[in-house]
Amino acid sequence: MSIKQKIKTVQDIKTEIVDISEWDVKIEIRTMSAKQRAELLTSSVGEDGKFVQKSFQAGLVISCCYDPETKEKIFSPEDGDWLMDKAAGPIENLATRISKISGLSKLAMEQAEKN
């Protein structure tokens, strides 16, 4: 098997179950794909060209949260506004854990904010 074929066929998306006690739910989070990351970074830039942290956090949660039983996405892009009206703790917890399993370092996030 060629290196290209090996890379193409390997299952590299990680999952983790997160208990969100504030909401009395368990959520499966998944590693963000490179495509999802690029789309999220693009959509997190405001009209003025500046990084919008609110959009980025909501996007992480929307993109990477799944029902552990059905394996279906929990949220859609239309849910961003009401999600950001929820308590900051659960959103921050999910966003931080998604960033960690997706390999988004704090430095990379700080650089995105600067651009």
Image (spheres, rainbow, N blue to C red):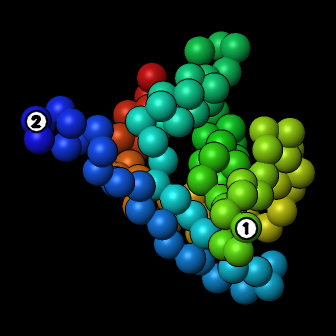
Residue at the disc numbered 1: 70
Image quarter hosting the N terminus: top left
Confirm whether residue 35 shows in the render: yes
**Occupied quadrant, residue 42:** top right
Classed neighbour count for the residue bearing mark 2: other residues with Cα under 10 Å, few (<14), some (14–19), many (≥20): few
Q: Amino acid at mark 2?
A: Ser
Residue at 38% across / 49% down in the picture? 104
Measure the alpha-carbon separation of dots 2 and 1: 35 Å
Confirm whether residue 84 shows in the render: no
Image height of 114 relative to 100, above or below: above
Image quarter hosting the C terminus: top left
Residue at 78% across / 52% down in the picture? 75
Residue at the disc numbered 2: 2
- Of the numbered discs 2 and 1, the one sitting upstream in the chain is 2
Q: Amino acid at mark 1?
A: Thr
Q: Which of the pair 41/7 is nearer the observer?
A: 7
Q: Is residue 18 left or right of residue 11?
A: right
Task: Tell me the mark number nearer the camera, choosing from 2 and 1.
Answer: 2
Residue at 81% across / 79% down in the picture? 23
Image height of 26 relative to 65, above or below: below
